[in-house]
Image (spheres, rainbow, N blue to C red):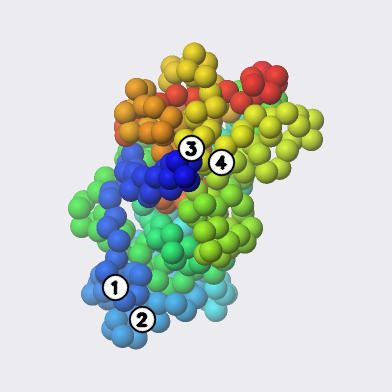
Amino acid sequence: MRRIAAVLLGFALLAIAAPAFAEDVQPPPAGSWAQAQIEAVVAAGLMAPSVEEFRPDDPLTRAELMPVLTALTGQEQALPEPDRLVTMRELDARLVRALGLAPAAKQIRAAVGAAGLKPPARLGTETVARLLALRFNHPADQDSLELLPGDPATRAEAAFSVARILDLRAQAADFQWVNDLAATMTLPAPTDWQRAVLTRAVRFVGYPYVWGGTSEREETPFEITARGGFDCSGFVWRVFKTQPFADAPLLAETLKGRSTYEMSAEEPEGERIPLESLQPGDVLFFGLNGSQSKPEEIFHAGVYLGGGWFAHSSRYGTTLTPLTGWYATSFAWGRRLLFEAGLQ
């Protein structure tokens, strides 16, 4: 029972953990899950003449996205194939471009590519979209609503993102910090095994956060069927455990427990890696009391890329995030699975 309780505590704490850069986004009120955001975009004269006519569950078409982009950029936007459905990755990419942050997204993807990690084309725009909190994490009992990068975006998902942008604009938000992050992002040259691990990790950038999720394919964790996605420890589990590396079968055996509590407790205290000694491929643990945390206080995990960045599945989905701010103060210790498996 103690183990089960610890797992549930870890998941619950992650759901309320604050991001390093994004504004805190409150859950929407009853009605459509994006009711408040739908009301905001309609009030701005976008996407529908009235809330009652909004059709939140319908897929978004390019024809419906064009006037939104025109309003955001101040320039007439024309997209080819106007009847084509907009995927989640296209929605994020179009909105990031509309904010003038396409160069930042390109720099982030280029930095990951320069380390030989073979980033997917969506990596830069998906990372920027999550730094700005343009994505919403559905409650665990609604994980069936979570969409994969290639899935058609619903009008409700678009409303949430557009309302977030309108809110940022109302606050006169300065996006220079995103440009600065991207411009200074440099990852160290990894070893062959570090590269193998991190290449797998960055493949999943853009996938949703799913409570108990361990796969990019359909699963039914906790009796809720989701199309695919990861929670924080499930992401680590997927990178290292569920698909053993052909030439390193012992690497998959280094992880025994599934929860952040169990994974962190497997590392003897004298072998824990401090912040200043992290290397690419290390597993990162975050706790309620930072470096003074006990294993039962560990509630988040990720995989270190190097250069002050890490990959993880947070409430905004699987993404890349700088190891600064809240993440730096909550960092507990790292674990070097490659060393444990005799590969480093």
N-terminal-most mark, 3 or 2: 2
User: Which numbered disc covers residue 260?
Assistant: 3
Residue situated furthest bottom in the rendering: 53
Q: Residue at x 48, y 37 (%)?
A: 260
Q: Please tell me how crowded label 1 is: few (under 14), some (14-19), or many (20+) other residues with Cα within 10 Å.
A: few
Q: Gap between marks 1 and 4, in whole Å?
A: 34 Å
> Does the residue at mark 3 contact the one at mark 1 (Cβ under 8 Å)?
no
Q: Gap between marks 3 and 4, in whole Å?
A: 7 Å
Q: Give the amino acid at mark 1.
A: Ala
Q: Gap between marks 3 and 1, in whole Å?
A: 32 Å
Q: Is residue 85 visible?
A: yes
How far from the left and from the top, in percent, is residue 132? 36, 49
Of discs 3 and 2, which sits in the foreground?
A: 3
Report the residue marked by disc 2. 54
Q: Please tell me how crowded label 3 is: few (under 14), some (14-19), or many (20+) other residues with Cα within 10 Å.
A: many
99, above or below 105, in the image: below
User: Which numbered disc covers residue 50?
Assistant: none
Q: Give the amino acid at mark 2.
A: Phe
